[in-house]
Amino acid sequence: MKDCSTQCWVILEYYIDNNMDANILYERLIEENLDKGFQVKLVVNNFRDVTYIQLRKYFLSYEGEWIPSREGVSIPASIENIHSLLYGLLDICAKAEGEEVIKFFHDHITKK
C-alpha cells in the first residue's frame, strides 16, 4: 500500500467527517457486532456529482453515534459495477446453496 502523508490523512479524515454521510440515497445494515462496537453498511451516496456504492465499517462513538471509518471500499455506482457486484453475490449464493444440496444428499445417501 502506498504511504499516505499527514496531509493525505487529514484530507481523508475531513472527507469521512464531512461527506461520508452526506447525500445518502440508500443505506442497509449488513453486519452488526455490538460486542466489538462496529457495523458494516452498504451505502449509496453522492459526492461531487458522482454516485458511489460503499461497503464501509462504522464504529460506535462514545456519544452513541455510528461513525464511518476509513475501513471500506467506495466505487462509482455505474451499471457495470452494480452488475458485477450482483453477479459476484449470486455466484457466492449459488455455490453455497449447491454445497448445501450436496451435503444434504450425501448425508441422506450415507444413512441408508
Image (cartoon, grey):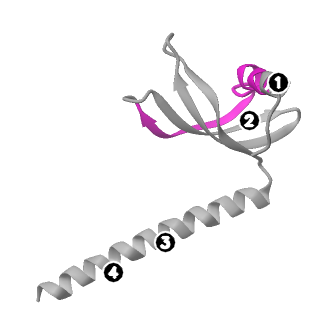
98 or 5, which is in the foreground? Answer: 5
Query: Mark 1 falls on what kind of element?
Result: helix
Dot in front, 2 or 4: 4
The reply to whether dot 2 and dot 1 touch (C-beta < 8 Å) is no
Mark 4, Cα crowd under 10 Å, few <14 / some 14-19 / many 20+, is few
Dot in front, 1 or 4: 1
Q: Which mark is residue 11?
A: 1
Residue 85 to residue 54: above or below: below
Which residue corresponds to mark 2?
45
Q: Which quadrant of the structure image shows residue 83?
A: bottom right
Q: CA distance from mark 2 to mark 1?
A: 19 Å
In the image, residue 87 lies at what x, y percent?
63, 66
Q: CA distance from mark 1 to mark 4?
A: 50 Å
Q: Earlier in the sequence, mark 2 or mark 1?
A: 1
Residue 20 to residue 84: above or below: above
Question: Is 111 left or right of 13, judged from the image as shown?
Answer: left
Q: Earlier in the sequence, mark 1 or mark 4?
A: 1
Q: Which mark is residue 94?
A: 3
Q: Is residue 31 magenta?
A: yes
Q: Amino acid at mark 4?
A: Ile
* Most distant residue in the top direction: 63
Q: Earlier in the sequence, mark 2 or mark 3?
A: 2
Q: Amino acid at mark 1?
A: Ile
Image: magenta residue range? 12-33
* Most distant residue in the right direction: 49
Q: Amino acid at mark 2?
A: Asn
Dot in front, 3 or 1: 1
Q: Which mark is residue 102?
A: 4
62 or 80, which is in the foreground? Answer: 62
Mark 2, Cα crowd under 10 Å, few <14 / some 14-19 / many 20+, is many
The reply to whether dot 1 and dot 4 touch (C-beta < 8 Å) is no
